[in-house]
Amino acid sequence: MAEERIRVDAEKLKALGARELQAVGVPEEGAKITTEVLVSADLRGVETHGIVSLVPFYIKGIQEGRINPNPNITVSGDDLSTATVDGDGGLGFMAAHRSMEEAISRAAKTGSGFVAVKNSNHFGPGFYYAMMALEHDMIGFMLTCSPVPEVVAPGSSTTAVGTNPLAVAAPCNKKPPFVLDMATSVVAAGKFRKAILEGKPVPEGWAIDKDGEPITDPHKRTADNGGLLSLGGKPELGVYKGFALGVVVDILTAVLAGAKPAVMRTEKKVSHLAGALKISSFLQVDTFKNIMDEMTEAYASLPKLPGVKNIFIAGGLEDEIQKERIANGLPLLPKVIQTLKETAEELGVEFDL
Amino acid sequence: MAEERIRVDAEKLKALGARELQAVGVPEEGAKITTEVLVSADLRGVETHGIVSLVPFYIKGIQEGRINPNPNITVSGDDLSTATVDGDGGLGFMAAHRSMEEAISRAAKTGSGFVAVKNSNHFGPGFYYAMMALEHDMIGFMLTCSPVPEVVAPGSSTTAVGTNPLAVAAPCNKKPPFVLDMATSVVAAGKFRKAILEGKPVPEGWAIDKDGEPITDPHKRTADNGGLLSLGGKPELGVYKGFALGVVVDILTAVLAGAKPAVMRTEKKVSHLAGALKISSFLQVDTFKNIMDEMTEAYASLPKLPGVKNIFIAGGLEDEIQKERIANGLPLLPKVIQTLKETAEELGVEFDL
């Protein structure tokens, strides 16, 4: 069933996407940031958050008036290590990138920097922004709430909390950086779309129906029939922890930005929190990075169960995928290329891939 | 099988424990902090982290030379919003309390405060320190690594990471505060000791043996036979997320304090990270707290599955337990009281409970 993929040049893909975004009114810098972030997801194998969404989600969102193409992004706040960014209803990429720059600049001055973002939209993969801290020898954080609840609270079969992902990145010396980017639900909703496409059932433990029974037929997860489960899945396996992590993300994003979390079903915009900790505020950067290297190696060297080839910590596998794709090109599905081509024609911009 | 509990006065219990700690050389302030923290766990129903450990773990640890009773706790660091506390091998309660005070003071000045703690020991329940931020209208964080690995990495049956708990507290207006305190493993090791005491099996999904098979007989979890599972339990249910959260805690505690995480099996001391975010740096405190109230109410008002009485967010149930115990006294097992009494006699301090 697998369609043959076509290898494309990542830089040309970014430029093409940016031309299309500029054609619908996004300023050059914002357009470049957006496709840089999207293509970084494809490069690291996180294709659900990659260029596949450029046209149907972001360009359509602008064309249909849900996303402001040319937002007036502002920064406010009187304190040295914190700030609030107003995304003015624009692309989440632009507001999130701005907020991470601000968090890094605050951390450079004071040791730590935390920046709330309000009036934003979906920002693609959170890891990109967390990783912005790495070249500054900082630990980076990026959290975002989801605009709609897709996850049930334990004890209920009504969706209440978003998949609310959190990302953390920390630098190593010679090893690939530690990069975590995870939904606080067992899986994100994209895994159901994938199962439907592949005609496969989903494992028990991903979602429940309105009666609280496990959903294994992916078609049965609908807006009025139960929802996803938080990480942990069942009470005796710690579902209240995954749920609480989702609520923590709501508090640190929506509530801290003065917006109402998804359970209150009144907001349409998305809030984020960007954070950075400057390693040299705590210890020598080399000491930190060398321990990170040794820790990565210690995990990789653990005795493995039969059939297990590698033990990676978060980001290790993605780093291998990225190296291969930078060397050999980005493998895209033909239909993704076709959509980009048709959109270039519609918008009157050059298709060069 | 349940032994009848005896209700005692929490303040008298704190004073008794503090006298015993002072008798083994802990200064008055450190002794008071320690029993204040331990009894707060009993008051909130987290008895595994309460006064039960005072004698066998902390007083014995001092008497046997593993814990420094009178540490010279120092604070260093040149940046405005960060610092490092050296616990000098003393009680973790003292170093953690000092670090949270420092985080709050940094956040008061700059908006955020993050303080690494090195050369510390077990600090009891992390939620206590996170909750110190609440009266300052801040969001509080406290993370700690575990000194020994008890949790296996996915793909291995060798213990590699600690149970590495994290705590987050955020204030409401009229509702109880949000208070999360969770191990990043499915369960903490104490749940196995409880199952053994009660003669019960444990659910599949808590631990695996050295062959990677589920352990359901709690006696079978030994130092050389597998270990606990990270939150998520199985690959298809997101165990790599729980594992990654455990590694995040190791990075933000051990590595940031210049110590080696448990997977490297070389350190005996424990590291922590204390954090605080000043709400008024981001928005009006009342706006934040009122949204927190509304969110708490929205979760409580969700339609419930049959048999479910309440839907609490983290801290809600513990708040109800605490109110009842403050009103009616703290229910202790007779053997806990007996140990405190015998220790008072041995140390020559007054037993008044």
Image: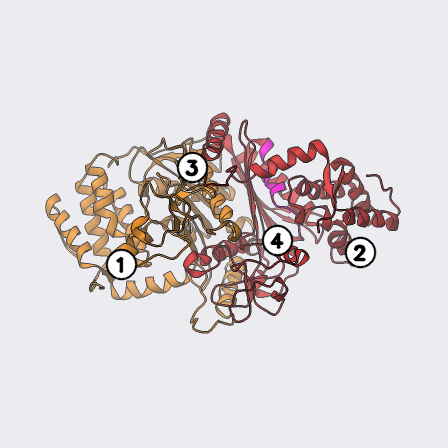
Chain colours: A red, B orange
Q: Which residues are magenta?
A: A122-135
Which one is in front, A333 or A227? A333
Q: Secondary structure at mark 2?
A: helix
When the figure is inspected, residue A239 is found, relative to residue A292, above or below; the finding is below
Same chain? Circles 3 and 1:
yes
Same chain? Circles 4 and 1:
no
**Parent chain of label 4:** A
Image position, residue A120 (x, y; %)? 66, 52
Answer with the quarter of the image where residue A324 lies.
Answer: top right
Q: Between marks 3 and 4, how big is the CA–CA gap?
A: 28 Å
Residue B134 visible to the viewer? yes
When the figure is inspected, residue B238 is found, relative to residue A226, above or below; the finding is above
Q: Is residue B318 left or right of residue A240?
A: left
**Parent chain of label 2:** A
Task: Kindly identify the residue that appears in the image at 24 percent across and 44 percent down.
Answer: B57
When the figure is inspected, residue B127 is found, relative to residue A35, above or below; the finding is below
Q: Between marks 2 and 4, how big is the CA–CA gap?
A: 22 Å
Residue marked by disc 4: A271
Task: Kindly identify the residue that appears in the image at 43 percent across and 42 percent down.
Answer: B103
* Mark 1 crowdedness (10 Å alpha carbons): few <14, some 14-19, many ≥20: few
Q: Between marks 3 and 1, how big is the CA–CA gap?
A: 41 Å
**Parent chain of label 3:** B
